[in-house]
């Protein structure tokens, strides 16, 4: 269960800073502006931060903490996580970067983090993540003021995540969740998908992935998730150069692009080829209007109608049939040479005024 991660009753921020340009301060201010629970900044050089009492160490917090966020140098992470584990904290977000995606020493520290968290039954997101946003708080280091909505975004790239949050702000597309996966040292994408699939505040899940953590789990568990709600995938690393870039970005093994696309379709997911399609689909699914599989084509070009029919069949959708009464009404509006050729497809050789009438 990831309840403490997504719905904590209290949050501590280790590495909360006085400098308003630093990540630790940005995250603190975002939490203060969105969260109604208890907040505990931790900084051994400050008495007060952003109007809140500051604690010298995790052990100085004498009340229970559900979620702890780390934004400190990588060399300090394992010791801080040990202290958090002893304090009984069960969920963490590790913002800090510079682990297996950087060098062997980073990989060693990341492994130590996993061992330490496991010892105390602590689950953690990251490292190398831009954070998390839920219906009750924003613990990311982006300033995007995102409208509350029903779409969940899961991104393995911080930069891509920031772009998608800014897009949601610009287009007023409502989000319920944003999860930056980072290196997935502990919490994997499948864990997040499973949690979101059971949350009614997420109508659909949109993900940018660079690699799958466990292929067997993906194939075995994703079908149960995609039955509950749509899960849309965009994958980075389609080219050989892109695969190499991924290794230095999140330390993931990209895997075969074609195999990934086939796997997504096998488990009932929706695969898109580019970011534009991902965001357009997110905009559509964020609407409160009911979404149906049946499509009516209205076009002033026979060729475009044929191509659209091909795409509908390719994507396992279906053409809707208009009732005879509606067809009769259309024939009254359209010129004789533009009469409907079938109940499903309407070729209209007409100008803008006629299309507006329809």
Image (spheres, rainbow, N blue to C red):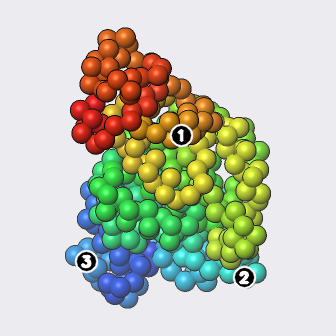
Does residue 231 appear left or right of residue 256 in this picture? left
Q: Residues within 10 Å of mark 3 (few under 14, many from 20)?
A: some
> Residue 28's x, y, as percent?
34, 72
Q: Position of residue 32 (x, y in %)?
A: 28, 66
Q: Residue furthest front?
A: 337
Q: Between tags 2 and 3, which lies in front?
A: 2
Does 3 sit above or below residue 306? below
Residue 313 appears at what percent x and percent y? 60, 32
* Lateral position of residue 334 relative to residue 132, left or right: left
198 relative to 113 in the view: left or right: left
Circle 3: element type: loop
Q: Which residue is mark 3?
A: 50
In the image, is residue 171 above or below residue 282? below
The mark nearer the N terminus, 1 or 2, is 2
Judge the density around disc 2: few (<14), some (14-19), many (≥20) Cα neighbours within 10 Å: few
In the rendered image, the quadrant that contains the C terminus is top left
């Amino acid at each position: 269960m990831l309840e403490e991660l997504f719905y904590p009753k209290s949050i501590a921020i280790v590495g909360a800073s006085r400098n308003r340009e630093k990540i630790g301060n940005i995250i603190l201010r975002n939490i203060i502006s969105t969260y109604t629970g208890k907040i505990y900044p931790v900084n051994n050089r400050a008495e007060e931060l952003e109007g809140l009492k500051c604690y010298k160490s995790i052990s100085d917090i004498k009340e229970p903490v559900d979620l702890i966020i780390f934004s400190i140098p990588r060399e300090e992470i394992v010791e801080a996580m040990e202290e958090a584990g002893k304090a009984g904290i069960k969920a963490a977000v590790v913002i800090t970067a510079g682990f297996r995606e950087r060098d062997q020493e980073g990989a060693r520290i990341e492994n130590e983090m996993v061992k330490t968290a496991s010892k105390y039954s602590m689950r953690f997101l990251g490292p190398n993540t831009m954070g998390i946003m839920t219906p009750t708080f924003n613990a990311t280091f982006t300033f995007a003021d995102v409208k509350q909505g029903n779409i969940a975004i899961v991104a393995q790239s911080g930069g891509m995540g920031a772009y998608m949050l800014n897009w949601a702000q610009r287009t007023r597309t409502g989000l319920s969740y944003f999860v930056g996966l980072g290196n997935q040292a502990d919490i994997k994408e499948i864990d997040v998908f499973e949690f979101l699939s059971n949350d009614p505040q997420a109508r659909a899940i949109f993900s940018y992935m660079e690699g799958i953590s466990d292929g067997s789990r993906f194939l075995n568990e994703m079908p149960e998730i995609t039955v509950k709600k749509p899960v849309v995938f965009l994958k980075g690393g389609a080219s050989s150069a892109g695969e190499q870039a991924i290794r230095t970005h999140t330390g993931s093994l990209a895997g075969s692009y074609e195999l990934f696309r086939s796997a997504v379709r096998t488990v009932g997911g929706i695969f898109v080829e580019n970011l534009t399609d991902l965001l357009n689909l997110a905009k559509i699914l964020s609407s409160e209007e009911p979404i149906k599989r049946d499509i009516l084509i209205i076009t002033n070009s026979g060729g475009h109608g044929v191509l659209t029919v091909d795409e509908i069949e390719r994507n396992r959708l279906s053409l809707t049939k208009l009732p005879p009464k509606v067809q009769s009404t259309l024939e009254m509006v359209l010129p004789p040479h533009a009469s409907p050729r079938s109940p499903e497809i309407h070729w209209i050789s007409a100008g803008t005024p006629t299309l507006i009438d329809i």
